Amino acid sequence: MTMTFAELFERLSARVRAKLDDASGCHDFDHTLRVLHNAELLAAELPGVDLQIVRLAALLHDFARPEEMAAKGKFCHARQGAELAGQLLREFGVDSGTVDRVVAAVRTHRYRSGERPTSPEAEIVYDADKLDSLGAVGIGRAFLFAGREHARLHNTREEALNSAAYSREDTAYREYLVKLRKLPEAMLTEPGRRAARERAAFMKEFFDRLNAETQFPASR
């Protein structure tokens, strides 16, 4: 008996949750649910997109995150995740056309990968993931990641920009300077850009305040 999309999505969600529930707090199943919600909101403003592709790709976008985190970033979770997502979808009997479109969206959702989305659905998933790195949630996630790596609470702009990833200087502020403040210009959809600008403004205000409270004049 062929599954309905609702049944397929429920079964896939259970598999993703089982894998990500114990992942680091900045990339756990809660993150996936927020990205899924962001993607659905963006899709609602962009007529003509295939919502099923959007929902499947958003659900599976970080399926290989635990492996990348364990390897401290030595391989790309988007590429590995695309392979694993394809295997999982085929296991559930999903048609090859759908598999190819979802796999492409998973493979191109990462900001640092150098690959860019080539479909409206993939653009939505890309933007939805970036939105969860911004605003109040983005601040919380940045500190969760820094804490996991035993980084300092805060450092100067110079210390942050002259340090390596996964080091004691890999603070939330470093993530903001290296990546997060640049995201609004990297968004691919108009509703994504609009939401990103608002969230980024809040982040700037927060880190300006943190710099002032920790008395790092050179960081302002």
Image (cartoon, rainbow, N blue to C red):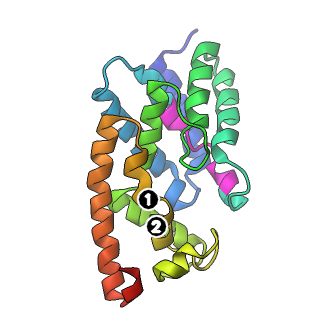
Front in this rendered view, residue 95 or 206: 206
Per the picture, the main secondary structure of the magenta-coloured stretch is: helix
Give percent across and percent down for residue 83: 70, 33
Image position of 136 (left or right of 68) = left
Describe the element under mark 1 as helix, strand or loop: helix
Residue sitting at x 51%, y 80%: 158
Three-letter amino acid code of the residue under disc 1: Leu
Magenta stretch, residue numbers: 57-68
Image position of 214 (left or right of 3) = left
Q: Mark 1 packing: few (<14 Cα in 10 Å), some, or many (20+)?
A: many
Q: In which quarter of the image is the N terminus?
A: top right
Give percent across and percent down for residue 139: 39, 65
Front in this rendered view, residue 21 or 64: 64
Residue 62 located within the stretch drawn in magenta: yes
Which numbered disc covers residue 177?
2
Give percent across and percent down for residue 209: 29, 78
